[in-house]
Image: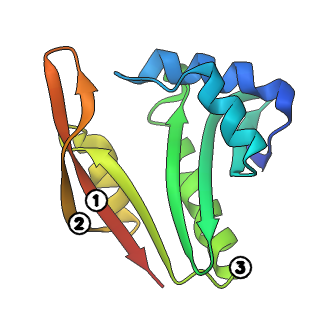
Amino acid sequence: MKPEIESIDLKDIADLYAIEKSVSQSPWTLEMFIASFHAGHGMFVAKSEDKIVGFLIIMDVMEQLEILNIATHPDFHKQGIASQLLSFLKNYAKQREINSMFLEVRKSNQAAIALYQKFEFEQIGIRKKYYKTDSGQEDALMMQFSF
């Protein structure tokens, strides 16, 4: 069954946080999710049978949009959830006349990089030592999609 994508309710934050902790090497804190909600960032969930299976958090400013966070519940990896969220995002951006989207991704996250490239994101730079790791810090690739 294909998940439905919808805006989150404040009550969904705990589920987003649980997914984030299960998939991220340096997860957002619960307070970061709450602050993002109150800041008015676009926060969307993919729900399957009333269960949150993935999420997407964005910030749009003028004609640009930044993907702040995207994740899929580990039990639903490799089922096209992230692709569905990115397809949703492209349509969302077109409707709002966004002309470019940006994101950062761990240099070592080859699966995510391949997904973003599939959606025509291109590397535009590197942020040195952007992500924390168990052994120090890791570079982030900066990627952009232009309409």
Left/right of residue 111 with respect to residue 75 in the rendered view: left
The residue at 52%/42% (across/down) is 70
For marks 2 and 1, the one nearer the N-term is: 2
Alpha carbon of mark 2 to alpha carbon of mark 1: how far?
A: 6 Å
Secondary element at tag 3: loop
Percent from the top left, x then y, of residue 110? Answer: 22, 43
For marks 1 and 3, the one nearer the N-term is: 3
- Kindly check if marks 2 and 1 are in contact, taking CB atoms under 8 A apart as contact: yes
Q: Quadrant of residue 87?
A: bottom right
Q: Amino acid at mark 2?
A: Gln
Mark 3 packing: few (<14 Cα in 10 Å), some, or many (20+)?
few
Left/right of residue 69 with respect to residue 15 in the rendered view: left
The residue at 55%/21% (across/down) is 29
Give the number of the disc on residue 96. Answer: 3
Left/right of residue 112 with respect to residue 43 in the rendered view: left
Percent from the top left, x then y, of residue 21? Answer: 50, 17
Q: Quadrant of residue 81?
A: top right
Give the number of the disc on residue 123. Answer: 2
Q: Amino acid at mark 1?
A: Met
Question: Badge 1 is on which residue?
Answer: 142
In depth, the one of 17 and 6 nearer the eye is 17
Alpha carbon of mark 1 to alpha carbon of mark 3: how far?
A: 23 Å
The residue at 72%/29% (across/down) is 52
Secondary element at tag 2: strand
